Image: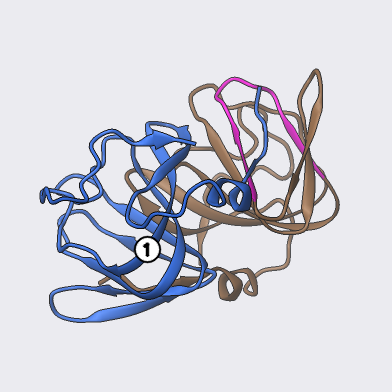
Chain colours: A brown, B blue
Amino acid sequence: MPEPISLREKLSRFDDHWNPRVIAELNGQHVKLAKFQGEFVWHDHADEDELFMVLRGSFRMEFRDRAVDVREGEILVVPRGVEHRPVADEEVHVLLFEPAATRHTGDVVDARTVTEYQWI
Amino acid sequence: MPEPISLREKLSRFDDHWNPRVIAELNGQHVKLAKFQGEFVWHDHADEDELFMVLRGSFRMEFRDRAVDVREGEILVVPRGVEHRPVADEEVHVLLFEPAATRHTGDVVDARTVTEYQWI
């Protein structure tokens, strides 16, 4: 049966960066939590739109032609096919909504690529 | 191009209860904001799971055999086919994530049923 999920409690369970954890699934979509710090890899997702919601802190989303700051209490939807790179000068806590099949580095595979997401 | 969306700014645009507004769409899913106060109608969604995230305040989600409190910073996923009724003793601000086709009163139509969701 449905039980409430505390975002704060789930965030306390991990400390590493760029390694999203799954906390819920609905309609073939995953709700994930992640901590970002530093620069991620340039990538896109050919078939998946991706939502970022900032729970604490802020980060900069770079696109090939510009960048936007995403602050606490804001969401950003990156449409499929749009190359992007998140950059966080300081640690930021982010909630992600995206199809369960989404690989966080998109079509790029690097040392940080996670192929099997961990549920917490 | 993607622009950050402030939840606080969007919430300031309406004051009525039980009337969700759409703020984003991705992968056939809507992100909505709503304000709840009082008792909603018992309903279920035959084909759609529904996510509730409390942004401010708290509410009680009643099921036929029990109830759970959902507080600020918590999410609750109600699986398809599970009858539920949100009840808020005081006003609560909620983010909803659900398929774009979802009707908030499910299979029930009452005076509050919205058939065409407004984008803000």
A96 relative to A120, above or below: above
Where on the picture, by quarter, is residue B85? bottom left
- What is the crowding at mark 1: few (fewer than 14 residues within 10 Å), some, or many (at least 20)? many
Question: Which of A27 and B17 lies nearest the eye of the viewer?
Answer: B17
B22 relative to B82, above or below: above
Residue B26 seen anywhere in this rendered image of the structure: yes
Whole-percent x, y for residue B92 in the image: 45, 67
Query: Which SS class for mark 1?
Result: strand
A80 relative to A74, above or below: above
Where on the picture, by quarter, is residue B68? bottom left
Whole-percent x, y for residue A89 in the image: 89, 50
Is residue A75 a member of the stretch shown in magenta? yes
Which quadrant would the N terminus of chain B be assigned to in this image?
top right
**Magenta region:** A74-87
Question: B111 left or right of A71?
Answer: left
Q: Residue at x 56, y 46 (%)?
A: B10
Q: Residue at x 65, y 74 (%)?
A: A12
* Residue on which the image places disc 1: B36
Question: B78 left or right of A20?
Answer: left
Residue A100 seen anywhere in this rendered image of the structure: no
Question: Which of B18 and B78 lies nearest the eye of the viewer?
Answer: B18
**What amino acid does circle 1 point to?**
Phe
Whole-percent x, y for residue B100 in the image: 33, 35
Is residue B95 a member of the stretch shown in magenta? no
Question: Which of A48 and B93 lies nearest the eye of the viewer?
Answer: B93
Question: B112 left or right of B34?
Answer: left
Q: Residue furthest right?
A: A89
